Amino acid sequence: MRISQKKKALEILTILKQLYPNATCSLDYETPLQLLVATILSAQCTDERVNKVTPALFNRFPDAPSFARGDREEIEILIHSTGFYRNKAKNIQNACLKIVNDFNGNVPQTMPELLSLAGVARKTANVVLAHGFGIIEGVTVDTHVKRLSNRLGLTKKDNPVQIEQDLMKLIPPPEWEIFSISIIYHGRAVCNARKPQCCECTLAHLCTYFKRNS
């Protein structure tokens, strides 16, 4: 019998929570500003690489004012290995300038205000709100969430905002962020991009990709 999309999503969530009971944000940070910067750096870069870069970066630039008035080239040098370093340095500095000028040096705590910052789309805003302030506004959609949500048949969309909207209809609001984090863990451990380990996957019986390719 074919189960409903919502029931399927809830079953996937239940299994993921059992598989990764301690799942949490993989980025190292101490303040919401550090989390914001780390999340901007994580675009098309692994969290592991970001965590190697940020200790020196945050030691040199510990807060928004220091980033805002800092030397752009020095920021670029410190974040070089994360890729797209010129654009990331520009976004980080411009975001911090706006935080200093418009938000009294504090990272804002609403989705619209966060989206007004350079380099911040809904993925970054969701991470900062959830892990920096304990505010759940949506489902964080990164490359893992995008890939697995499509493979599992929870969405057919390609656009992250549209994927988020589909997932928000299927997952209870309090579970939005834990769903994202658990999916990310599963994407790293089992359902990787090139060679998903379908035969070892506890979600295979619910997976559209597995059924189509088995």
Image: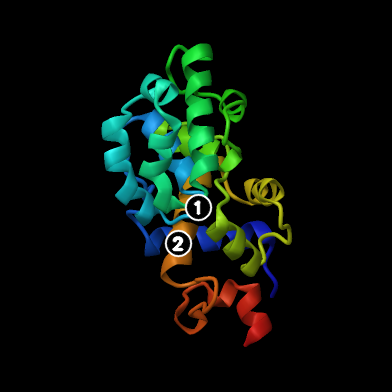
Question: Looking at the image, do the residues carrying marks 2 and 1 touch, with CB atoms under 8 Å apart?
Answer: yes
Judge whether 59 appears above or below 189 on screen: above
Q: Which mark is residue 179?
A: 1
Q: Position of residue 122 (x, y in %)?
A: 60, 39
Asked whether residue 192 is in view, the answer is yes
Residue type at tag 1: Phe
Residue under label 2, please give it.
16
Judge whether 40 appears above or below 9 on screen: above
Residue type at tag 2: Leu
Q: Residue furthest bottom?
A: 214
Q: Residue 145 occupies which quadrant of the picture?
A: bottom right
Judge whether 33 appears above or below 150 on screen: above
Q: Position of residue 45 (x, y in %)?
A: 47, 55
Q: Position of residue 107 (x, y in %)?
A: 45, 23
- SS category of the residue bearing label 2: helix
Judge whether 151 appears above or below 128 on screen: below
89 sits to left or right of 57: right
Mark 2 Cα-neighbour bin, 10 Å: few <14, some 14–19, many ≥20: many
Q: Which mark is residue 6?
A: none
166 sits to left or right of 15: right
- SS category of the residue bearing label 1: helix
The front one of 207 and 192 is: 192
Sequence-wise, the earlier of marks 2 and 1 is 2
Residue depicted at x 59% and y 72%: 206
